[in-house]
Image (spheres, rainbow, N blue to C red):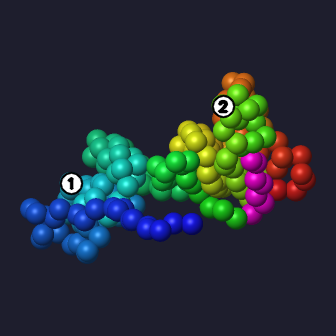
Amino acid sequence: NADIVFSAFGRYPALEGFEELPHSKKGLVVNEYLETPAKNILAAGDIAGTHTATEAIYGGTIAALNASGFRKYFNLDGIPYVIYTKPQIAYAGKIEGKCVKVNVAELTRSATDKEFEGFLKLCVKDNHIIGAQAFMENAEDIIGAISSLIRLKAKLEDAIDLVFPHPTYLEIISEAIRRIAFSGKT
């Protein structure tokens, strides 16, 4: 239950100096390589319509690479998002397909820390890890690791070889992967 919900998400693009380029309320019009219609002008971050620091930092990297002669696609599939509450809420990818839920209380680390609240939900489709949600302390680390698996299009049989230090909260990922793998068809 909550008495008040406060939302302060995103920014508005500062278009000063770029008004002549095609734009909308969201920002400059860019293609999948973050190129504007104007020759040699690329854009990333708030001015290009992405509204999280994670997206903006990644977009800046892609724009810089493309300005340097690379041809990298700006792909937001599996990008991690974190809400910094206590405990944290984090997610990446799609929550569909076959999903399993592992409670934090099942981890050895939860007993040593006396931290029993939270869970990880991991989803697989066509034998690939496609999404996850975490509600727990350190959710940012858990989703960061899973985001890498999603973005690398990891197959379940490859991900099952992941080994994390014991006892850590990262082990929740291995446990979720094992449960999906041993439960049958994915």
Residue 100, horizontal then vertical, whole percent: 78, 54
Cα distance in 3D space between marks 1 and 2: 53 Å
The residue positioned 17% from the left and 62% from the top of the image is 14
Taking 97 as reference, is 53 above or below it?
above
Query: Which mark is first along the chain, 2 or 1?
Result: 1
Marks 1, 2: nearer the viewer: 2
Residue closest to the far bottom: 24
Q: On the picture, is 181 further left or further right than 168?
A: right
Tell me the kind of residue under disc 2: Asp
Residue bounds of the magenta highlight = 97-103
Report if residue 140 is visible in the image: yes
- Whether tag 1 and tag 2 are in contact, CB under 8 A, the answer is no
Which secondary structure, mark 1? loop
For mark 2, what is the residue? Answer: 113
What amino acid type is highlighted by mark number 1? Asn
Residue 71: assigned label:
none
Q: Position of residue 116 (x, y in %)?
A: 70, 42
* Outermost residue toward the front in this view: 3
| Vertical relation: 58 (above or below) 130 | above
Residue 17: image quadrant is: bottom left
Residue 3: give x, y in percent of width and height. Answer: 47, 68
